[in-house]
Image (tube, grey):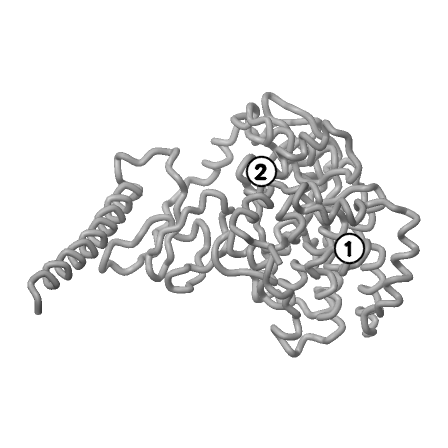
């Protein structure tokens, strides 16, 4: 072989080896830097999650704890927060040993325990979120309530404070059996708080994880029916929720579904000041939320969401309830949004042929990509829910058109087709980002 050819081949191989070794060195340094025992670690480091099978590293800064995605290297499901540090090479995974904790340590370290706020005495925490804690409390008459607080360290975060106040104001307007009831809200010693109904039960998300409490088809439909009744009540008051998902649906021990978390709710017709405020809030909401239940129009611009967007989110939740997974999943946030924008809408009966046809048709119509192909409003959806519960097929196209003609006179709950369809001139943060990558184009 010619010497010059050998030299070119050698130089090519050397460059490849150097690139590979450089990547491995960088990965090793990054791994060492991120170990909990490393003195260089700081509180401001980007949160990471690692695949439990291949140790692939992912930036999970914008994902919620417990959210799932698929490892792009080995296709293993990764749960955010399940594994935050990589396993040392050749060392088998070991479960951390629980540390003994003195009884009452947590309560004694919480300054809110024992305090009385707005007539409610706080006794214990119920759950902790990213920005605050929900507590269990009792009034002087012995009635049970929940008290949601926002940590004082977020008092200077304008967007977080506005979202908290929006949740309080929206919740106070929605007094209905299938909404978690809000009683009052205010500020106490730097803590913004909301006093609300105590729900003796669990979230739909928790039920989905609990295989021992599997629901039959009728029970699943009743969950959807209850939430649809809540949406119909909100629709009559020109309000949309914009964040319907299993996490935000509470199921009481009596089997009643209640919609909660009104942090992204808004009135459909608002003035310019509210729209400006909404733009900042919904950017935060979309970034921090999960995309699995978002309709295409809400991904493009959250301000475009109307009652049909809530219907889509409820349909995607029901799809998850019946199929064991959301309609679109796999990969990171951008991958899921790309699938929602471009992939064919799946049918429940294709995922599980044992699911009745009328249930599959109901959910499919709820999650149609085009808003005009979905139910026109929650009232029309309720009619089909009852038909399916009675064992009947969903409404025909002619019957839907008659419902549409009945609803045209009301002209509330959503904008015109021009407002919904002007994608080029009205694009939100993610809409512009998706457009840059050519996602959603036909």
Tell me: 106 left or right of 277: left
168 displayed left or right of 32 = right
Whether residue 224 appears in this view of the structure is yes
Quadrant, the C terminus? bottom right
Specify which label sits upstream in the sequence, 1 or 2. Answer: 1
Is 433 drawn above or below residue 396 in the view shown?
above
Please state the horizontal and vertical placement of residue 44, each as a whole percent of the image.
39, 33
Quadrant (top left/top right/bottom left/bottom right) for the N terminus = bottom left
Mark 1 or 2: the one toward you: 2
Q: Nearer the viewer, residue 245 or 209?
A: 245
Specify the quadrant of the image occupied by residue 100.
Answer: top left
Q: Secondary structure at mark 1?
A: helix
Q: Which residue is mark 2?
A: 284
Q: Position of residue 302 (x, y in %)?
A: 66, 43
Q: CA distance from mark 1 to mark 2?
A: 26 Å
Q: Residue at x 45, y 60 (%)?
A: 70
Q: Residue furthest left?
A: 3
Count up the numbered dots: 2
CA neighbours of label 2 inside 10 A, class few (<14), some (14 to 19), many (20+): some
Q: Residue at x 61, y 51 (%)?
A: 247
- Which structural element holds mark 2? helix
Counting other residues with Cα less than 10 Å from the Cα at mark 1, is it few (<14), some (14-19), or many (20 or more)? many
Q: Residue 228: give its label.
A: 1
Which residue is at the far bottom?
354
Considering depth in this image, is 249 or 280 the residue closer to the camera? 280
Asked if 382 appears above or below 323 in the picture, the reply is above
Q: Position of residue 198 (x, y in %)?
A: 69, 43
Residue located 50% across and 60% down the image: 330
């Amino acid at each position: 072989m010619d010497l010059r050819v050998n030299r070119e081949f050698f130089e090519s191989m050397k460059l490849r080896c150097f690139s590979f070794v450089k990547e491995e060195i960088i990965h090793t340094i990054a791994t060492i830097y991120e170990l909990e025992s490393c003195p260089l670690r700081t509180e401001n480091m980007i949160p990471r999650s690692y695949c439990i099978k291949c140790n692939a590293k992912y930036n999970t800064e914008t994902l919620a704890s417990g959210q799932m995605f698929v490892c792009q290297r080995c296709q293993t499901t990764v749960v955010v927060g399940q594994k935050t540090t990589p396993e040392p090479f050749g060392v088998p995974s070991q479960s951390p040993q629980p540390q003994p904790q003195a009884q009452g340590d947590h309560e004694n370290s919480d300054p809110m325990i024992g305090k009385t706020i707005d007539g409610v005495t706080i006794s214990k925490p119920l759950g902790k979120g990213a920005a605050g804690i929900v507590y269990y409390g009792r009034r002087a008459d012995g009635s049970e309530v929940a008290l949601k607080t926002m940590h004082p360290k977020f008092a200077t975060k304008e967007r977080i404070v506005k979202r908290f106040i929006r949740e309080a104001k929206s919740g106070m307007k929605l007094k209905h059996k299938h909404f978690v009831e809000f009683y009052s809200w205010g500020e106490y010693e730097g803590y913004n708080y909301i006093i609300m109904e105590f729900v003796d039960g669990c979230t739909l998300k928790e039920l989905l994880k609990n295989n021992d409490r599997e629901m039959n088809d009728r029970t699943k439909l009743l969950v959807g029916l209850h939430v649809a009744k809540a949406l119909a009540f909100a629709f009559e008051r020109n309000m949309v929720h914009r964040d319907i998902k299993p996490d935000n649906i509470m199921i009481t021990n009596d089997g009643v579904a209640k919609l909660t978390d009104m942090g992204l709710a808004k009135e459909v017709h608002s003035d310019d000041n509210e729209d400006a405020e909404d733009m900042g809030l919904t950017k935060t909401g979309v970034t921090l939320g999960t995309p699995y239940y978002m309709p295409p129009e809400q991904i493009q611009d959250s301000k475009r969401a109307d009652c049909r967007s809530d219907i889509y989110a409820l349909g995607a939740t029901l799809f998850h309830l019946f199929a064991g997974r959301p309609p679109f999943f796999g990969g990171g946030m951008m991958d899921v949004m790309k699938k929602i924008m471009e992939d064919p809408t799946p049918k429940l009966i294709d995922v599980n042929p044992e699911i009745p046809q009328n249930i599959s048709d109901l959910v499919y119509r709820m999650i149609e990509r085009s808003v005009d192909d979905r139910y026109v409003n929650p009232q029309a959806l309720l009619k089909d829910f009852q038909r399916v519960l009675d064992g009947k097929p969903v409404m025909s196209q002619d019957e839907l058109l008659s419902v549409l003609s009945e609803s045209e006179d009301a002209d509330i709950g959503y904008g015109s087709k021009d407002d919904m369809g002007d994608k080029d001139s009205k694009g939100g943060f993610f809409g512009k980002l998706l457009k840059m990558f050519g996602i959603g184009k036909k």
